[in-house]
Image: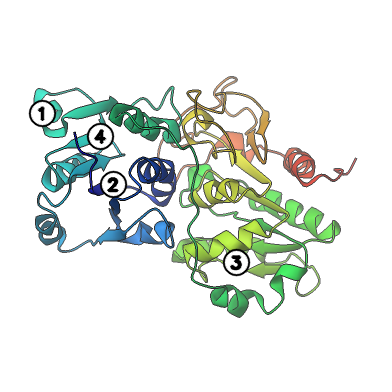
């Protein structure tokens, strides 16, 4: 069979899913260097692929007009690859190409016909990056397990927000507010960490999403810190996603919850501390820089603190039930706005000790 000349990679999910699909995109580009590879993603996630050198075009699926877009894709590609286990992604693959491979499940015969080749979705055992790289195996091409961060055209957005010469003063980046409450650590814990970082002569840069509730939560957290002016800079909602890459690359440390920006920090080779509660580190732990991608996952399921290279995962303290960490649910109340006892009980001393290890300094006694 001739090598495909036009390929479509479909990832119709959230920011982190799109970022963790970039190792597969890189694998395809290295296997087919002369091919044009496009990516189909939801419009709000397109910035994750900005400046990606392996892509010819990023096709953003809008909220309105999706059917018209899919019609334009009819049989346009030699190969379509769906990296997420979703019906919408599977239908898009069927529309785009006669030849298609996908992450999915064999629950119905028609789905097997629709997709031609299926790699079984197995989040209990496989890291999300490894899951997508099984599609490379199915195509008979080599795995390239490298998460590729987005790139801005220049640093103008950072210069405008952080000021000229922002690279020259040592700083740490914190991302305290996840999209969902059940992944969140406590405000008091973040404040204690900020004060400790300031005592290490590090400026603290706060990143966050543009959603109104996220920005309001960050503002409430920072109120009353009583630190010298300029010690903390809040850039939440003020930068495009791609601009976070050079900002995080120049940081001495990054600390965040289970969120897309934490995955980005690990890919930037910045010392990265991820605070995990109910989520599975096996499937969703930040991908450590340089990991070879051969094992099912870099991470184990229930370890209080584990570290690989530039990346560490700190799991929450015991919640309502001993041995419930991680519960793999959406918080103790099983919905996205739920608190998670394991994160609410995570002490600032534990976080500071883990941060100090990654930073290479000594935690306070």
**Viewer-nearest residue: 57 or 257:** 57
Residue corresponding to mark 1 = 113
Q: Position of residue 12 (x, y in %)?
A: 29, 48
Q: Residues within 10 Å of mark 4 (few under 14, many from 20)?
A: many
Q: CA distance from mark 1 to mark 3?
A: 51 Å
Tell me the distance, in whole angstroms, between the alpha carbons under discs 4 and 3. Answer: 42 Å
52 relative position to 317: left or right? left
Which residue does the numbered mark 2 point to in the structure image?
9
Q: Image point 61% across, 46% down: which residue?
A: 185
Residue beneath the point at 35% across and 27% down: 137
Spatial separation of the CA atoms under disc 4 and disc 1: 12 Å
Tell me the element at label 2.
Answer: strand
Which residue sits at x=46%, y=42%?
338
Numbered mark located on residue 219 in the image: 3
Q: In the orientation shown, which residue stands out farthest toward the right? A: 365
Res 17 quadrant in image: top left
Label 1: state its secondary structure: helix
Residue closer to the observer: 303 or 338 = 303
Name the residue carrying label 4. Answer: 102
Q: Is residue 307 visible?
A: yes
């Amino acid at each position: 069979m001739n090598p495909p000349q036009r390929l479509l990679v479909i990832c119709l999910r959230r920011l982190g899913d799109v970022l963790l699909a970039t190792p597969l995109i890189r694998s395809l580009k290295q296997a087919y260097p002369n091919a044009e590879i496009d990516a189909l993603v939801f419009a709000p996630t397109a910035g994750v692929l900005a400046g990606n050198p392996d892509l010819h075009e990023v096709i953003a699926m809008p909220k309105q007009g999706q059917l018209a877009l899919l019609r334009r894709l009819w049989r346009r590609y030699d190969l379509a690859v769906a990296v997420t286990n979703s019906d919408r992604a599977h239908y898009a693959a069927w529309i785009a190409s006669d030849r298609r491979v996908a992450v999915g499940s064999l629950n119905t015969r028609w789905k097997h016909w629709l997709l031609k080749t299926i790699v079984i979705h197995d989040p209990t055992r496989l890291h999300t990056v490894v899951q997508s790289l099984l599609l490379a195996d199915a195509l008979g091409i080599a795995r390239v397990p490298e998460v590729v961060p987005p790139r801005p055209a220049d640093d103008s957005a950072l210069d405008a927000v952080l000021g000229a010469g922002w690279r020259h003063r040592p700083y740490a980046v914190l991302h305290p507010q996840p999209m969902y409450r059940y992944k969140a650590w406590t405000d008091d814990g973040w404040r204690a960490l900020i004060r400790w970082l300031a005592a290490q002569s590090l400026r603290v840069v706060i990143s966050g999403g543009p959603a109104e509730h996220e920005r309001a939560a960050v503002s409430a957290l920072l109120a009353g810190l009583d630190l010298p002016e300029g010690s903390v800079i809040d850039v939440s909602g003020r930068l495009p996603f791609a601009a976070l890459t050079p900002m995080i690359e120049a940081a001495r440390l990054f600390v965040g919850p289970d969120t897309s920006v934490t995955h980005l920090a690990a890919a930037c080779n910045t010392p990265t501390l991820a605070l995990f509660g109910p989520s599975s580190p096996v499937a969703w732990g930040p991908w450590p820089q340089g990991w070879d991608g051969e094992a099912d996952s870099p991470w184990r399921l229930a370890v209080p603190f584990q570290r690989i290279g530039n990346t560490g995962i700190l799991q929450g303290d015991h919640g309502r039930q001993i041995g419930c960490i991680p519960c793999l649910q959406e918080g103790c109340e099983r919905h996205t706005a739920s608190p998670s006892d394991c994160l609410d009980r995570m002490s600032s001393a534990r976080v500071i000790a883990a941060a100090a290890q990654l930073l290479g300094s000594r935690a306070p006694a």
